[in-house]
Amino acid sequence: MKDIVVDKYAKAFFEVTYANGTAGECAMQMAEISKAFSPEITAFFKNPFNSLENKLTTAKSALEGKCSAETFNFVCTLVEKNRVGAMTEISKELTTMVQASAGITKGKLFSAIEVSPEFLKQVEAVASKALNKKVELLFEKDTTLIAGYKVQVAGWTLDDSAEAHLRILKDELMKKGL
């Protein structure tokens, strides 16, 4: 289930930056900033004994001049509203929105063994054609697969695994009464 807070903040930031033509740049900046927020740093911002002024001063000194004004102000808003703990999820949702606005859909290709970059590109092309969208796939190893692969993109699954082929064969044999 999607977090309403994450969704609202990401959507608001996306709308402002998209209107300014800086959504992609700001999404990349947010991704980098969210990586810097280790559990220890996040704990500092969540600690009720640290004053808001202290938290803002820390955030401002770390970011000033190192990112766009929109990103700087957004992070300061997250600090003010005590939402720093949601920064990573907000950043991911923002990236998804930017990619969707560019017509890109992310997905995963699962296989028991490493696949070549060429094979990944071929599968991306097939998925892109089937969904009529630009699809970018990330490889993920799945040791439960015996052979073949599975692709998951935007609620759509292509299962070309040995298990799927055996299931189809079994169904066909059952239909024929064998």
Image (cartoon, grey):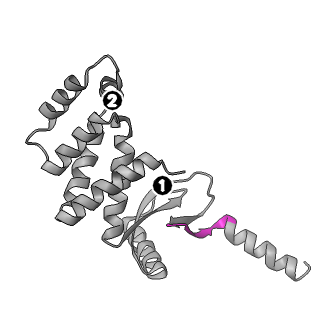
Between 149 and 57, the one lying in front of the other is: 57
Q: Residue at point 24% right, 64% down?
A: 18
Residue 60 in the figure: left or right of residue 104? left
Q: Say whether residue 142 is magenta.
A: no
Q: Quadrant of the C terminus?
A: bottom right
Q: Say whether residue 157 is magenta.
A: yes
Which label sits on residue 140? Answer: 1
* Percent coordinates x, y for residue 139 in the rendering: 44, 58
Query: In the image, which residues are magenta?
Result: 154-163
For the view shown, which residue lies furthest in the right direction?
177
Kind of residue at badge 1: Glu
The kind of secondary structure the magenta stretch mainly shows is: strand
* Percent coordinates x, y for residue 25 in the rendering: 19, 57
Residue 22 in the figure: left or right of residue 95? left
Which label sits on residue 87? Answer: none
Residue 168 in the figure: left or right of residue 89? right
Circle 2 residue: 42
Q: Secondary structure at mark 1?
A: strand
Between 124 and 47, the one lying in front of the other is: 47
Q: Residue at point 28% right, 19% down?
A: 50
Kind of residue at badge 2: Thr
Residue 161 against residue 47 in the figure, above or below: below
* Percent coordinates x, y for residue 143 in the rendering: 58, 51
Between 143 and 86, the one lying in front of the other is: 86
Answer yes or no: is residue 68 visible.
no
Spatial CA distance of label 1 from label 2 is 29 Å
Q: Residue at point 65% right, 66% down?
A: 162
How many labels were placed on the picture? 2
